[in-house]
Image (cartoon, rainbow, N blue to C red):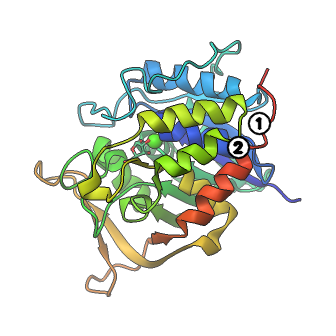
Amino acid sequence: MTQLPIIIDTDPGIDDAVALLMALTSPEFDVIGLSVVAGNVSFEHTLANTLKVRELTGRPDVPIYPGCDRPLLREPVYGLFSGAGGLGKAALPEPTLSAETEHAVDFLVRVLGEAAAGHRPKPTLCPIGPLTNIALAIAHSPEVVAGIDRIVLMGGAFADLGNRSIAAEFNILVDPHAAQIVMACGAPIVMLPLDLTHKAIATFERIDAIRALNNPVASVVADLLTFWDRRDVDRFQTRGGPLHDPTVFSYLLNPEWFSGREGFVAVEVASELSMGHTVVDWWGQTDQPPNALVLTDIDADAFFDDLCRRLARYVKSAP
Ligand code: RIB
Ligand code: CA
């Protein structure tokens, strides 16, 4: 099997944790590293949570790089649904290994620069948090964009409105200036916005199927997703929470379960009312060429069935 080299930029966060548990047990991926950013909770917690989740996966070979602890320009905004520490009430083992000393931005510049120079395969960047680290790497060394195969990110909201504000999806709202840099960088971009992830609800039935896997990691995931329940039947027509971040890896593994269309995406960075709002030109009304494939539909049953299959691989407790 030819593995897909990926770099995951993450802000755990309950759905990030599930995404990492899914990605790190998928042999289709060569996970070059995890870069950490502040987001769902403060950087202190997102870094600690990334270390804890890696411990649970039994993958000490995957390095963790500490990144930015605040957005480029704006005051920090944190998430509302992952609990104070960022992993709900789940008790994960204390990490026995530490993070790398190299900053995430330096890591990204180094690896992408090597790829741009042809010294390694070009990785797919998988940002599932605010885009601060990615934007800083691009601003630091614009030539590294040539070393990116694709950017496949969870973020944005189009026909569906915002979650952390009425107008904006959280990852973009936290650092809209970073998002603006990334959307303009010229690398091929695939976006998985709320329009898609709000169709991937971790319902109680789906949580029960995960818990029935009866292994320690699946039990942690079931506990995390139980905490993730939004209780917002008006918006989601069911109990449960939208499982945003794992959809990025499901798309990489099974693109046929997803659909969308290309468009020109822009980010609001001026209006306080709609800060971080993402707009898309589907019909060529601007003179701008498309800069992203925006995915809006998912085969949610196939996604959750595959998530279960992958979590079932944790048949014994991770060391
Ligand atoms: O809006 C959802 C996104 O914001 C997810 O990535 C979640 O983990 C938070 O980072
Ligand atoms: Ca996230």
What crowding class fits label 1: few (fewer than 14 Cα within 10 Å), some (14-19), or many (20 or more)?
many
Q: Nearer the viewer, residue 109 or 65?
A: 65
Q: Secondary structure at mark 1?
A: loop
Q: Secondary structure at mark 2?
A: helix
- Quadrant of the drawing holding the N terminus: bottom right
| Image position of 287 with respect to 170: above or below | below
Q: Is residue 69 visible?
A: yes
Q: Amino acid at mark 2?
A: Leu
What crowding class fits label 2: few (fewer than 14 Cα within 10 Å), some (14-19), or many (20 or more)?
many
Q: Nearer the viewer, residue 310 or 296?
A: 310
The residue lying at 62 percent from left, 12 percent from top is 94
| Image position of 208 with respect to 247: above or below | above
Q: In the image, ligand 1 is in what quadrant?
A: top left
Residue 63: image location, x then y, percent: 70, 29
The residue lying at 52 percent from left, 23 percent from top is 90
- Quadrant of the drawing holding the C terminus: top right
Q: Are marks 1 and 2 in contact (CB under 8 Å)?
A: yes
What residue did someone put label 1 on? Answer: 314
